[in-house]
Amino acid sequence: MQEERLAEFLKRYHSGESNAATSRVLECVFSIKGIEVRQMVNRLRRKLGLQNDIQTVYKVGYRLNSAN
């Protein structure tokens, strides 16, 4: 599913303190709109239990917590 692709994308390219993926990048990579990015991130957090692992970076986008 697309949520798993998002988790892998964040894990591979956007983990750590300074590597946030912008919402625009996620829109382009996954061919979806901004609201769909937010919905997909929220589904991923609930479905895979990543509530504390996927961080929202204010006015930037998302990143995977560097502890993973």
Image (cartoon, helix red, strand yellow):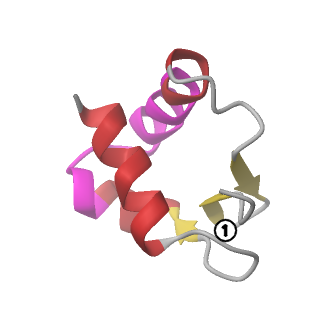
Q: Residue at x 61, y 71 (%)?
A: 20
Image-based side of 7 in relation to 19, left or right:
left
Residue depicted at x 66% and y 68%: 60
* Type of amino acid at the residue the image marks with label 1: Val
Q: Nearer the viewer, residue 5 or 42?
A: 5
Badge 1 crowding class, 10 Å Cα cut-off, few under 14, some 14 to 19, many 20 or more, is few
The verdict on residue 29 being magenta is: yes
Q: Is residue 24 visible?
A: no
33 vs 45, nearest the viewer: 45
Give how far across and how far down residue 28 sits, in percent: 26, 62
Dot 1 falls on a residue whose secondary structure is loop
Residue 12 occupies which quadrant of the picture? bottom left
User: Is 22 displayed left or right of 12 in the figure?
Assistant: right
From what the image shows, is residue 16 above or below residue 41? below
Residue 29 in the figure: left or right of residue 8:
left
Across and down, in percent, residue 38 comes to 53, 36
**Predominant SS of the magenta segment:** helix
Count all numbered tags in the image, as a single digit. 1
| Residue placed under numbered mark 1 in the picture | 60
**Residue at 72% of width from left, 51% of height from top?**
56
Where is residue 59 shown, x and y percent of the image? 73, 64
* Residue at the extreme front: 68
Outermost top residue: 47
Q: Residue 68 versus residue 36: which sits nearer the camera?
A: 68
Question: From where the camera sits, is residue 39 visible?
Answer: yes
> 60 or 43, which is in the foreground?
43
Where residue 29 appears, x then y in whole percent? 25, 61
Instruction: Establish if 26 lies above or below 22.
Output: above
Magenta region includes residue 13: no
- Magenta range is 28-43
Identify the image quadrant of the C terminus: bottom right
Q: Residue at x 53, y 68 (%)?
A: 22
